[in-house]
Image: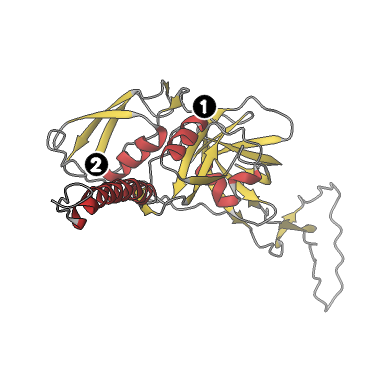
Amino acid sequence: MAEGGDLRASNPRASWRPLSVLIMIVALVASGVLAAPVTADAATHARRHMPDLIGLGRAQVYAVMRADALYFMTTGPGSSNGTWREAVGQSPRPGTVVPWHFQATVRTSLANPHGPRRVPRLIGLSRARAFAVMERVQLYFDTRGPGSTDGKWVVVLRQSPAAGTRVKWHATITLVVSTHRPRTKKPVRKPVRKPVTTTTVKKRPTCTPVTTTLPPTTTTSEPTSTTIPGETTTTTTPLPPTTTTTICKVPVTTTTVKHEKRRRYRIGDATWYRYIPGHCATWYLPRGTRITVRDLATGKVIHCIASDREGAHGNRVVDLDTAQFAELAPLSKGVVVVKVSW
């Protein structure tokens, strides 16, 4: 034993063990905290699929695009002042893979997305075309007939209700379908009757001379005879007088001319609304009239059938379907000056 108390053996490494353990715990906690934001940030910026916006209202489009962290710009009626009510088209298509914060283009319309709509004409359309048309107008349909159970039908034969009928949003239309297209005879084109002009060439008059013999004049008198010796006496009896008359026949000239029926027309403003493709609305023509619409600014021509009645009068001459109006001018233009003939 030495002075100052007992000398105990001490290990210098023992004092560093608690410190090393503490450092390891702090490092693990720090690595977990730092790794979590990186993983979350990577998931936020991942690529995503473009949502389906067709048929959605204005508020629904905003909510869907905000939830997917995507931006969009609008084109079409009501896009400039924010009064549009329904999305009728989009680019890119639904399901396309796009990056984070991608900006899409949405075509808009002023129509009520949940309002009533007209049944389109589906007779004669194929299966894919019928699906596309019904999806665009947001209506459902069920099928009957050959191929309706397994989805192998190829053409629509009949529909109920008829085209042009106003139904509720998401109403169901009944289609009679078939797996074979019916054989149709080629229409026989009737020959176009041209104006007939009949002209008789004027000939010289035909003249026929006619001779008329006048009856002799009877005179009662005593005969006078003169006898001269050595001479012969000859008595001459005068012939009855005659008259010659010339009769001329003049041919009759007949001319028959048939004129073509003149086409009538109106010049005024044309606008558009969501309707059956190939059909239009007027306020002055009977339903079923086939009309020709010519854009006076560009010269473009379309044809449609006036099957609807518009309420406007005055300078408004026709309301076209959106597809046919787009053939003349962009939908954003709204109104074009046209010539309507029938």
The reply to whether residue 246 is in sight is: yes
Q: Residues within 10 Å of mark 1 (few under 14, many from 20)?
A: some
Give the vertical position of 260 relative to 240 (above or below): above
Q: Amino acid at mark 2?
A: Val
Image point (51%, 51%), residue name = 193
Q: Are marks 2 and 1 in contact (CB under 8 Å)?
A: no
Measured from the top left, where is residue 209 in percent x and y?
A: 71, 61
Q: Is residue 226 above or below residue 286?
A: below
Q: Tell me if mark 2 has few (under 14), some (14-19) or many (20+) residues whose alpha carbon lies within 10 angstroms of its own.
A: many
Residue type, label 1: Asn
Q: Position of residue 258 (x, y in %)?
A: 62, 48
Residue that protrudes farthest toward the front in the picture = 3
Q: Could you tell whether 301 is left or right of 276 in the image?
A: right
Which residue in the structure is indicated by mark 1? 112
Furthest residue toward bottom: 230
In the picture of the structure, the residue carrying the numbered disc 2 is 155
Q: Relative to the observer, which residue lies in front, 68 or 104?
A: 68
In the shown orientation, is residue 218 left or right of residue 71?
right
What's the CA distance linking mark 2 and mark 1?
Answer: 31 Å
Say whether disc 2 or disc 1 marks the residue closer to the N-terminus.
1
Element on which disc 1 rests? loop
Name the residue nearer the viewer: 309 or 86: 86
Nearest the eye: 91 or 195:
91
**Taking the image as drawn, is residue 258 in sight?**
no
Q: Secondary structure at mark 2?
A: strand
Q: Residue at x 60, y 46 (%)?
A: 293
Rendering coords of residue 72 (x, y %): 51, 45
